[in-house]
Amino acid sequence: MKIAISSVGPDLDSMIDPRFGRCQYFIFINPESLEFEAVQNTSAQASGGAGIGSAQLVVDYGAGVVITGDTGPNAAITLQAAGIKVFLGASGTVKDTIENYKAGKLTESSSPSVKAHAGMGGGRGMGQGRGMGRGRGRNN
């Protein structure tokens, strides 16, 4: 079974990226042979929908398991709908994480570990509208 691991780099000595939707790479790996393919996450810089886009990438590459630090609700729903098992709270290197998975030291989760949030925006509108509209419509 192919496993997808969120990573900050493209090899087995890279650290786990705790962010599923915005991780830099996914390492798709066969846990028995340790043969792997590093794929840059094209959703990492998306203004919105990064969790869903990342989940779709994992589905497209045929992974049956995801190992990451955290997932949001949209990613969790998408992965669950695809029948992909999710293990959260991973840390350390990709190689160490695979060993922990094989030893049964990781915990499966079907719930998101972070709340919903919208994209990469900083929310800097700052309420500058001042409510100066003059309401020129008819009064009924």
Image (spheres, helix red, strand yellow):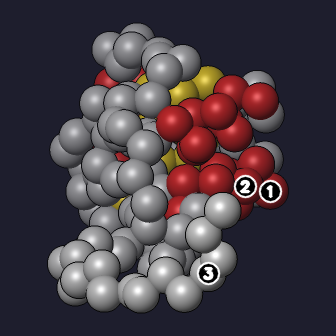
N-terminal label among 3 and 1: 1
Quarter of the image for residue 132 reads bottom left
The CA span between labels 2 and 1 is 6 Å
Q: What residue type is labelled 1?
A: Asp
Q: Judge the density around disc 1: few (<14), some (14-19), many (≥20) Cα neighbours within 10 Å.
A: few
**Residue holding disc 2:** 56
Residue at label 3? 137
Residue depicted at 33% across the width and 25% down the height: 100
Q: Tell me the tag on residue 60.
A: 1
Crowd tier of the residue under label 3, counting other residues whose Cα lies within 10 Å: few below 14, some 14–19, many 20 or above: few
Residue 6 picture location, percent across and down: 43, 53
Of residues 24 and 126, which is closer to you in this image? 126
Query: Is residue 93 visible in this depiction of the protein?
Result: yes
User: Which element carries disc 1, helix, strand or loop?
Assistant: helix
Q: Which amino acid does label 2 sit on?
A: Gln
In terms of depth relative to the viewer, which is nearer, 72 or 57? 72
